[in-house]
Amino acid sequence: MRAAFFLSVIAARLACAESLNKSTDASEQISGVSFGSPPQPVVAYFGFDGPDLLIPPFMNATNGANVSRNFPKNDSEYMYTSFTDDPVLGEQKVVVNGFELQNFSFEEYNPKYAYADHIEVGLCLVDHEYSSAYGISTIDSLKSSGYIKSRSFALFHNTSAPEFEANQVLFSAIDHGKYDGPLVKHKHYSYYSSDAYWKHPTLVMDGIAGYNFSLSGQVYAQITENTWWLPQEYNDQLNAYFEDRYGFNLTNVSCSIMDSTEYISFYFSGVEYRVLDSAFFYTSHENGTTTCVFSGVLKYYNTDTYQVSRKLFDHHYLVVDYDNEEIAIAQAATKSKPQTIEEMSTGIPSATPAKYYSYSSLERKTVILSDSQFYYTTTAHPTYSMYTGQRLGWSATESFYSSQTSSSTPSDSVTSAKPTASSTASNSTKASSSSKGAGTSKTAGALTFVGLLSAMIMF
C-alpha cells in the first residue's frame, strides 16, 4: 500500500515536470515576464541589481490591469525559494521569456525598489562561496530546469521604450538582427566578478578619455545597474573634467548636465566605447525639488575590483556568457532588421576577439613576507594611447558608425605591470562636438592589479 502511494507521488511529480518542460524553445523565446494563475504579462525590468527575482505584492500588467501575488506564510522573511513540489506562491506561476520557472528564488522587498509595481529580473549570479543569504539565480534556475544550454544572455536596450520595459533579454541565445557592425569579444573575469553577494559580468578596463584629457590604468570593472565605482585617480580626473567643462564638480551638480551631448570614452582591450556625460548622474525628485546627483562612489576604498554602470552600453548589444567566460559587445542596430536568433552553448557565436584579447590574461605573482605567503595578479597587456584604440561604439553627435584605428600605431610590446602614460590625443579620431585636442594625459598610480587576499595563503 505504502509502495503504491510512493509510486503515485513519483508519477505525479514526473508528470508535473514533463508538463513544465513543455515550454518555449530557447531560439523562439520572447523577452518578457508573465505572472499569476493563469499567468498574464506584467511589466518587468531585466537588470544587474541582483541575481534573482523581485516580486512586489502588487504589480502592473502590460494591459494596465493590477496583479497581486500571494503572501508567503512566513512574512518575517524577505527572500524565498519556491520549489516545484513546495510552491511558496501556491497556484501562481512565474513565466520568464516563455519558460515557467520551477525552482527559483525571489525577494518580496528591496529598499531600492520599496515602491516597485513591476517585477525585477536579475541578470547576475549568486556567489555561494561568500553568501548564503541568496538562493537560486534566475539564470541558474533556467539552466537547471533544462530550458537553456548555458548560463548566458543577450541584452538589447530599446532607447525608445518606457524605462521599465527598455531592456530586452534572450537567455542562452543571441539575436543577430539586434546589432550592426562587428560583435567584439572580451574576456569575463569570474574570479573578480563577486561583490560578496552576487557575481557580475566583469571586464578589464584600460583607461578613459574625454575633452582635453586621457587617463590609462588597468582595473577590473564589474557591470552594475547604475553604479560608477572607479579608482581615486579616475574620480579625480572626472572631477577636474566636469569642473573645467561645465563649472561644477561631482558633489555639486547642475541639472543642465542632463542635456549635454558630450561624451567620455572608455577603453577595453584596445576598443573604445562611448557614454554620454549625463550617464554619470541621475535625477532626484524630493519635496518638490529636483536635483541631479553623481551615481557613483567617491569615497576611496583599497580594492582590486571596481564597477561601471550598464548605461555605458545603453547603445550597444551586450552578450554575456558566464559558463564560457566571454562578454561580447556590438553597436546596437539603429534600424529594424529581421530577427535571426541563434542558441548559445559553447561560447558566443560570430564574435571576434578584441584587438588585445589575447593579452588580457592573468599572471600570478608571489610575495613572501616573513613566514607568510601572499600573492597578487597582474595583466599582460600592450600599452596604447587613449584616442587611438579601435573606435567601436555609439556617438552622441555622429550619425555614422565607424570602426577604425588612428594613424598612430599602438605598441605591441607587452608590459605586465605598468603601462606607459597615454600620449597626446590624435585628431584623426576625435569627434566633431567633443573637440578632443592635445590635452593632458596621465597614467593611474595603481596600475598593477593587487589582489591581496583577506587571508594568508599557506603552503
Image (cartoon, grey):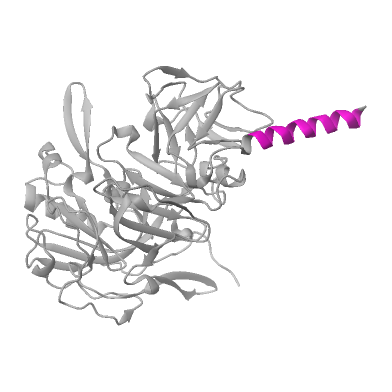
Q: Is residue 13 left or right of residue 459?
A: right
Q: Is residue 5 left or right of residue 287?
A: right
Quarter of the picture containing the C terminus is bottom right
Which residue does the image show at 39% across and 28% down from the upper left? Answer: 43
Which quadrant of the figure has residue 363?
bottom left
Horizontal and vertical percent position of residue 176: 37, 53
Residue extending farthest to the front is 338
Horizontal and vertical percent position of residue 243: 9, 50
In the rendered image, the vertical position of residue 392 relative to residue 139, given as above or below: below
The answer to whether residue 314 is seen in the rendering is yes
Which quadrant of the figure has residue 15?
top right
Front-most of 294 and 414? 414
Horizontal and vertical percent position of residue 5: 86, 28
Front-most of 159 and 327? 159
Magenta stretch encompasses residue 18: yes
Type of secondary structure dominating the magenta stretch:
helix
How many numbered callouts?
Answer: 0
In the rendered image, the vertical position of residue 310 relative to residue 13, given as above or below: below
Q: Is residue 8 left or right of residue 122?
A: right
Q: Is residue 149 left or right of residue 375?
A: right
Which residue does the image show at 57% across and 40% down from the upper left? Answer: 135
Which residue does the image show at 17% across and 48% down from the upper left? Answer: 277
Quarter of the picture containing the N terminus is top right
Which residue does the image show at 16% across and 72% down from the upper left? Answer: 406
Horizontal and vertical percent position of residue 323: 52, 57
Magenta stretch encompasses residue 136: no
Residue extending farthest to the right is 1
Front-most of 174 and 341? 341
The answer to whether residue 444 is seen in the rendering is no
Which span of residues is magenta-colored?
A: 2-19
